[in-house]
Image (spheres, rainbow, N blue to C red):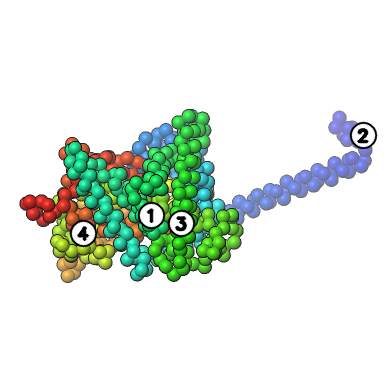
C-alpha cells in the first residue's frame, strides 16, 4: 500500500521529501558524533573523575531533601559522618549538597581546588545583602572581577593592621572600647539588685563602637539615635538570618506565614543595614583628606582603583575594572562591618564564658600578664609574643566553642574529586568545622578545654605557641574564602583578655552561671550567664 501512495505523489514532492530525509539523517549522524566528542573530551578533562567513587549519604525526601532530619546542624552531620564517612552527600531541598567533616577533606577541597570551591550558591537572599555586590556572597561567575575585589579587600585590611600609623590607631581604638566594656560591666553590676548582670548588651555596644572606629574613624554615645539604629538592626537581623538558607533551599516554605514574614524581614533589614553603612561612608567621605589614615575607609581610598570616589561619587553601575563605583565600595564595607561585629561579639562572650567557668585558667593569664608588664603596667599589642599562654587560650576558645560550626554554603564551579569521590559541578558544599575541631583522631580529649594543647617548651625552656598545631583547627576558613578580618579579631581578643584579667577578677552569678550549650544565629554564642567585674585593688585580701 505504501509504495502505491509514494508513487502517486508528485515527483517534486518526492524529491523534496527524499532530500529532507537525507538531510535529517545527516543531522542525526552529526549530532551523534558531536555528543560522542563532547563525552570523550569531558572524560579527558575530568581524568580521574570518571573513575571516582559515587558519594553515599542518608535517604532524602522529595522537595525537602534531608532538611527535616537536620535537628541540630553540625551534630547531625557528625552522626552521619560516623555512618557514611567524612565525605558524603545530602540534599537541602532539591539541592545536591556535599558535606565535608575532616581536615584533610576540607583542605583538599578549598586549598587544592581553591577556585572550584570558591563559588557561592545563587540564592535569592544574596541579591539583597550588600546591594548584591559584596564579595561575601558573589563569586567569579556572578561578578567577573570578584578575585580582584577580594584581593583588594584582603590587601587593605592587612595594610590597616600592619602599617605603623594605622596599627597604633587600631590598638588605641581597641583599648578605648575594652576599657569602656570593663568599666560599664563593673558599674552596672554594682547598680543591679543581684550584683550581677548579663554582659551581652554591653559587649555588643562596645564592639559595635569599635567597628565604627575601625571602619569610619568615630564612635557614638550609646544614646545616639544613629548608633541605636545600628544595634537594633544587628539584633533583628540575627534573629531572622537563620531562616535565610532554609527559604533559599526550599522556596516553597514561603507559603507558610512564618517563613514569608521572615523572608520579608530579612530583605527589609538587609536594606536598612546597607543604607546605614552607606550614610556613614558619605559622612566619612565628606571629611576625608588624602594622605590621612584615621579609618579603614581612608586606607581603602588611597588607591588608584578608588581615587575617583574622592572627587565625585558614582552611584550607578560601573563596568570598567579601572575604577570602583560608590555602591561597590560601600558593599565591601557592609561585608566587613557585618561579619566583623558578629564574630567579635560571639568570641568575646565565649572568652567571658570560659574564664568564668575555669578561674584557674584566668589566673594563669593574669600571672603571665603581670610577669610581662607588672601589676601597674599597660598592656600593648607589641607584647603579644610574650603572652603565649594568653594566645593559646584564645585559640582554644575558638577550637572548643567552634563558633562557626558550619560555614555559609559554598558552590562548586566545576567537577572535582575529593578524597576519591566525584563531586559534580554546581553542588552546594558545607564544611563542618565542629567535626574538625573535635576530631578525637587528632585532638586528645577534644571535649576538654585545655589551652596547653597549643603550647610547647623551646630548647631554652621558654613557653611558646606550637605553630604546627594552631592551623589544625578551623574558624576563619581557608583558601579563597578565608575571612580577611582574622587579624583584627585576634588583636581585639588578646588585648581584651589581657587588659580585663589584669584589671579585674571575673565572678559569675551562682544562680546564672556559665553552662554548657550554645545558641546559634550567624555564629554560635554561649547560653546567657550573669557576671560582675571587681577591680583587683578593691579586694581587701589582695590575692594575685
State the separation of the CA atoms marked 3 and 1: 12 Å
Q: Is mark 4 on a helix, strand or loop?
A: helix
Instruction: Name the residue beneath numbered marker 3.
Output: 283
| Left or right relative to 308: residue 386 | left
Q: What element carries label 3?
A: helix
Q: Where is residue 462 in the image (x, y as percent from the top left)?
A: 18, 66
Q: Where does the N terminus fall, quadrant-wise?
A: top right
Instruction: Name the residue beneath numbered marker 4.
Output: 389
Q: Residue at x 30, y 41 (%)?
A: 518
Tell me, yes or no, whether the two marked residues, 4 and 1, touch with CB atoms within 8 Å: no
Tell me, yes or no, whether the two marked residues, 3 and 4, touch with CB atoms within 8 Å: no
Q: Where does the C terminus fall, quadrant-wise?
A: bottom left
Q: Nearer the viewer, residue 308 or 152?
A: 308
Q: Quadrant of residue 453?
A: bottom left
State the separation of the CA atoms marked 3 and 4: 42 Å
Instruction: Name the residue beneath numbered marker 2.
Output: 8
| Between discs 2 and 4, the one toward the N terminus | 2
In the image, which is nearer the foreground, mark 4 or mark 1? 1
Instruction: Name the residue beneath numbered marker 1.
Output: 212
In the image, which is nearer the foreground, mark 3 or mark 2? 3
| Between discs 4 and 1, the one toward the N terminus | 1
Question: Visible in this render: residue 386?
Answer: yes
State the separation of the CA atoms marked 2 and 1: 89 Å
Amino acid at each position: 500500500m505504501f509504495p502505491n501512495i509514494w508513487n502517486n505523489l508528485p515527483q517534486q514532492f518526492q524529491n523534496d521529501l527524499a532530500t529532507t530525509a537525507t538531510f535529517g539523517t545527516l543531522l542525526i549522524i552529526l549530532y551523534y558524533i558531536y555528543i560522542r566528542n563532547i563525552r570523550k573530551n569531558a572524560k579527558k578533562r575530568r581524568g580521574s573523575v570518571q573513575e571516582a567513587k559515587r558519594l553515599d549519604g542518608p535517604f532524602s525526601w522529595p522537595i525537602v531533601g534531608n532538611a527535616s532530619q537536620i535537628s541540630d546542624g553540625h551534630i547531625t552531620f557528625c552522626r552521619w559522618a560516623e555512618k557514611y564517612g567524612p565525605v558524603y552527600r545530602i540534599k537541602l531541598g532539591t539541592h545536591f549538597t556535599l558535606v565535608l567533616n575532616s581536615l584533610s577533606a576540607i583542605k583538599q577541597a578549598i586549598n587544592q581546588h581553591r577556585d572550584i570551591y570558591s563559588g557561592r550558591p545563587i540564592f535569592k537572599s544574596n541579591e539583597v545583602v550588600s546591594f548584591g555586590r559584596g564579595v561575601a556572597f558573589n563569586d567569579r561567575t556572578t561578578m567577573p572581577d570578584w578575585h580582584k575585589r577580594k584581593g583588594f579587600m584582603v590587601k587593605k585590611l592587612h595594610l590597616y593592621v600592619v602599617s605603623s600609623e594605622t596599627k597604633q590607631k587600631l590598638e588605641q581604638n581597641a583599648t578605648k572600647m575594652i576599657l569602656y566594656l570593663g568599666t560599664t560591666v563593673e558599674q552596672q553590676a554594682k547598680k543591679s539588685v543581684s550584683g550581677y548582670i548579663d554582659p551581652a548588651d554591653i559587649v555588643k555596644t562596645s564592639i559595635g563602637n569599635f567597628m565604627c572606629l575601625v571602619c569610619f574613624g568615630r564612635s557614638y554615645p550609646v544614646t545616639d539615635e544613629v548608633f541605636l539604629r545600628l544595634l537594633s538592626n544587628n539584633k533583628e537581623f540575627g534573629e531572622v538570618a537563620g531562616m535565610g538558607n532554609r527559604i533559599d533551599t526550599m522556596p516553597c516554605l514561603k507559603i507558610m506565614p512564618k517563613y514569608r514574614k521572615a523572608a520579608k524581614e530579612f530583605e527589609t533589614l538587609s536594606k536598612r543595614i546597607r543604607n546605614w553603612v552607606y550614610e556613614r561612608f558619605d559622612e566619612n567621605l565628606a571629611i576625608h583628606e588624602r594622605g590621612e589614615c584615621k579609618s579603614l575607609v581612608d586606607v581603602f581610598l588611597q588607591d588608584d582603583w578608588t581615587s575617583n570616589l574622592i572627587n565625585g561619587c558614582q552611584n550607578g553601575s560601573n563596568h570598567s575594572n579601572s575604577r570602583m563605583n560608590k555602591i561597590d565600595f560601600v558593599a565591601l564595607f557592609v561585608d566587613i562591618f557585618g561579619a566583623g561585629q558578629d564574630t567579635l561579639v560571639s568570641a568575646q562572650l565565649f572568652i567571658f564564658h570560659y574564664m568564668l567557668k575555669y578561674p584557674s585558667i584566668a589566673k594563669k593569664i593574669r600571672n603571665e600578664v603581670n610577669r610581662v608588664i607588672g601589676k601597674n603596667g599597660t598592656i600593648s599589642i607589641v607584647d603579644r609574643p610574650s603572652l603565649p599562654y594568653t594566645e593559646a587560650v584564645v585559640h582554644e576558645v575558638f577550637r572548643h566553642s567552634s563558633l562557626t560550626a558550619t560555614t555559609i554554603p559554598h558552590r562548586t564551579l566545576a567537577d572535582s574529586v575529593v578524597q576519591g569521590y566525584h563531586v559534580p559541578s554546581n553542588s552546594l558544599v558545607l564544611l563542618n568545622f565542629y567535626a574538625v575541631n573535635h576530631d578525637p583522631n587528632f585532638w586528645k580529649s577534644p571535649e576538654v578545654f585545655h589551652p596547653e594543647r597549643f603550647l610547647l617548651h623551646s630548647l631554652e625552656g621558654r613557653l611558646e605557641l606550637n605553630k604546627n598545631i594552631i592551623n589544625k583547627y578551623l574558624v576563619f576558613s581557608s583558601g579563597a574564602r578565608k575571612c580577611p578580618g582574622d587579624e583584627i579579631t585576634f588583636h581585639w581578643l588578646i588585648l581584651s583578655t589581657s587588659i580585663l584579667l589584669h584589671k579585674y577578677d571575673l565572678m559569675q552569678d551562682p544562680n546564672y552561671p556559665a553552662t554548657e550549650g550554645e545558641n546559634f544565629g550567624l555564629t554560635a554564642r554561649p547560653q546567657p550567664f550573669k557576671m560582675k567585674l571587681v577591680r583587683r585593688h578593691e579586694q581587701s585580701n589582695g590575692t594575685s
